[in-house]
Each structure stands twice: as C-alpha cells, then as structure tokens.
Amino acid sequence: MFYNSIEAAPPDPILGLTEAFRRDPREHKVNLGVGVFVDDAGRTPVLESVRRAERMLWETEKTKDYLPIAGLPTYGREVARLVLGDELHAAMAGRVAVGQTPGGTGAVRIGMDLLKTYRPDATVWMSSPTWGNHHGIAAAAGLATRDYPYYDSVRTRVDVDGMCATLEQVPAGDAVLIHVCCHNPTGADLEPEAWERVAAIAAKAGWLPFFDFAYLGFGEGLAEDRTGLLAVLKRVPEAVVAFSLSKNMGLYSERVGALLLVAESAESAEVGLSHAKRLGRVLYSNPPRHGAALAALVLGDPELCALWEEEVKTMRERIRGLRRQLVAGLTARQSAVDFCFIESQHGMFSFSGLNDAQVAFLREEKAIYMAKGGRINVAGLRSDNMDYVCEAIAESLKLDE
C-alpha cells in the first residue's frame, strides 16, 4: 500500500501542541500555545456584532450557491476600506484588487504562489524569528527564503538598525515579508519612525513588500495598527497584503481572509487578480461564503461596525491587562529575570525568553503548554490560572541556577 511505504509526518509545532493539550488528563492544564483569544471563562466568544449579523443573514440569505473564485464582492470592498483606511482607499482608487481567501494562511499561500508565477527565482526575506508556517508555505510554493534581523533577545526589542541594514541589501527582484503589527511570535513592533525608514528603503531598493496583517486592532487601535502599512504603501508602486479577520472578529473556524494586490494601475491589479484566481481555482476552487458574508454585514452596517470596534477595543484592553498582571505576578515571585518588556509588546504573543528546557519542564511537570522558543499566547491566560502560571514560570527559572 502507498501509506505503508512512508513514515508519519511530525505533528505541527502549534496545532500538534493543542492536540497534546487536549489529550492531557490533568485538570489544571493551561494552553498558552495556539493563538486564540479567550475570555475569563476560557471560551473563545462569538462577538455580539457577529451574532447580530448572523441573525440578519439567517433572515435574508437566499442561496448557498458557489461564490466567484475571487469571493463575495461586498466583502472585498469592505476589506479594502478597512485595511487601507478611508483616505488611502479613496486615493488609490482601482489600484487595489482583492481576492477572498480561506483565512490569512490561504492569502499568504496564494500570494507566495503568485510571486512564484511572476518572479520564479525570487527569494522571500523573513524576519528572524517569524511565524513558523511562513517558511513552510514558501517551501510549498517553491520559493527560497532568507532571514533578516528583527528581534534583539538581549535588549528585548526590535533590532531596527540590523533590520534596515539588511533590507538595504535585498535585491530588487526579491520580496520582503513584514508583519504589520502584533508581531508573531515576539510581540515586538516597529515604531512609526522605524516604519518610515523601512518605507524609504523599500522605495529605493525596489523589492516587493509582502505584508502579513493578521491582528488589526489588537495592537494600539484600528487606525494606529495600519500606520506602518500605509507609510510603505504611499511610497511603493506594488505590494502584497495577506489579511485575516480570524482574531479581531473571532471568526477562527470560518476561515475569513483576503489577499490585497496593490499595483501601479487598475489594469495591472486586475492582471494580478486574474492569476490569483487561477491559483485559487486549483487549490480550493471557491472560498467559503458564510464567514465573509458575516464580515461584510458587520463592516458595512454603521451600527454593527461601531459595536464591533468597541468589542475589538475590549479584547485589546483585556490582553493589555493580562500583560500587566503577568509582569506583576512574575516580578513578585522572582528577581532573576526582568519581565517588564512584556508590557511594552503588542497583541496576543510574547517572546518570554524561556528556553526549551524550561518550556519542557512547564509542559511535563506543570501541564502548561507553550511553543518551543518560549512564545506565550498571553490571550490564553485567565484570572483563575494567572497565579499558577506565574509560580510555575518562577520555578522553571531555577533550572538555570
């Protein structure tokens, strides 16, 4: 048999961790691995704005027919306005084409495949570190990858000078993958001044900016989180943006993403979209309707959109509060490591600085699950496990004594 001739694939570093967590019988277990937001009861909530949109959709939807390959048109229009903001969206007119994708991951994959089509010899430059799936997607698309410096683990901040020095040397035919906000896995973001440096380098060097925009609203705010993206888009003729509504609308299982192609002209944007549609056709044929329809309703209805913005603010402030509690709890229990940097990071993730031995200890001895490298999903913490997690991490630090 075919399957008897091959070995089993290794589990996914993140999703496999969740599978192991679910099998763990210990009642006090804590999952800080997978990137999902939970409330203080440990649930990933359905937002009220989405719930109301669901009622509206139930009352008005007339068909479950296939969507076009590029997805729901109203969804594409609303996503473009959300990602770019009203001012730039109006200024760029038809230069931006949008294709709906199965999640942000689908957008990254179609974008990578599109790059392979247009620039088959291109290298994709990625931050060190980056989301683990980025390298796998690039490899599946047949693209080579290289790293650029990003996170300084000693000073626990972005290495802006090292990053910019490397980006200045990236060849014009290559692509540079940049996290727009809430960097995964570090939580360390570029400041506005650093974004201006990156924008100037991109305009001069001529490489293709490829943005991963998965956490809009989870950093500083909806307008603030797109600041760096807009700084670059105002200065370059072309760019790719992979966007996701999984986190900020809580639509994880609906797989709601989009690929935005920024081109020099409307005609070029449509050419790019035609190839994106061709690639989507052989991967998944048509994107799913339900989640996109919900998102389009929320974004297109002023009352629902205002409610959604408040809900995003509530989630963002909860994560900030959890960061403060985590730092306070760790500071009270040990003095070997200064964890104050966690408060200045953005979004769901933090590069905690814990080594793999400490991560293994926490999993095996304390039933606390986190990714290798010490990435913590801060949004997975709750008031009923905060003390336990802080005590366990403080105990793990003694392994280095």
Image (cartoon, helix red, strand yellow):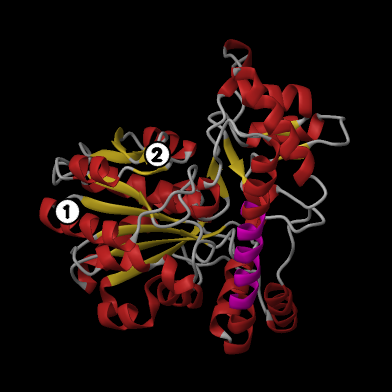
Q: Dot 2, how many residues are within 10 Å of its Cα: few (below 14), some (14-19), or many (20+)? A: few
Q: Which residue is mark 2?
A: 155
Q: Disc 1, disc 2: CB below 8 Å?
A: no
Q: How many marks?
A: 2
Please report whichever mark, 1 or 2, sits nearer to the chain's N-terminal start. Answer: 2
Query: In the shown orientation, is residue 376 left or right of residue 130?
Result: right
Q: CA distance from mark 1 to mark 2?
A: 24 Å
Is 56 situated above or below 359? below
- Percent across and percent down for residue 116 are 28, 42
- Percent across and percent down for residue 331 are 64, 42
Residues drawn in magenta: 309-323
Q: Quadrant of the image for the N terminus?
A: top right
User: Is residue 316 part of the magenta span, yes or no?
Assistant: yes
Residue lying at 82% horizontally and 29% vertically, measured from the top left: 24
Q: Given the current orientation, which residue lies at the most extreme bottom position?
A: 302
Is 88 situated above or below 4? below
Q: Nearer the viewer, mark 1 or mark 2?
A: 2
Query: In the shown orientation, is residue 307 left or right of residue 373?
Result: right
Residue lying at 50% horizontally and 42% vertically, measured from the top left: 185
Query: In the shown orientation, is residue 203 left or right of residue 184?
Result: left
Q: Amino acid at mark 1?
A: Ile
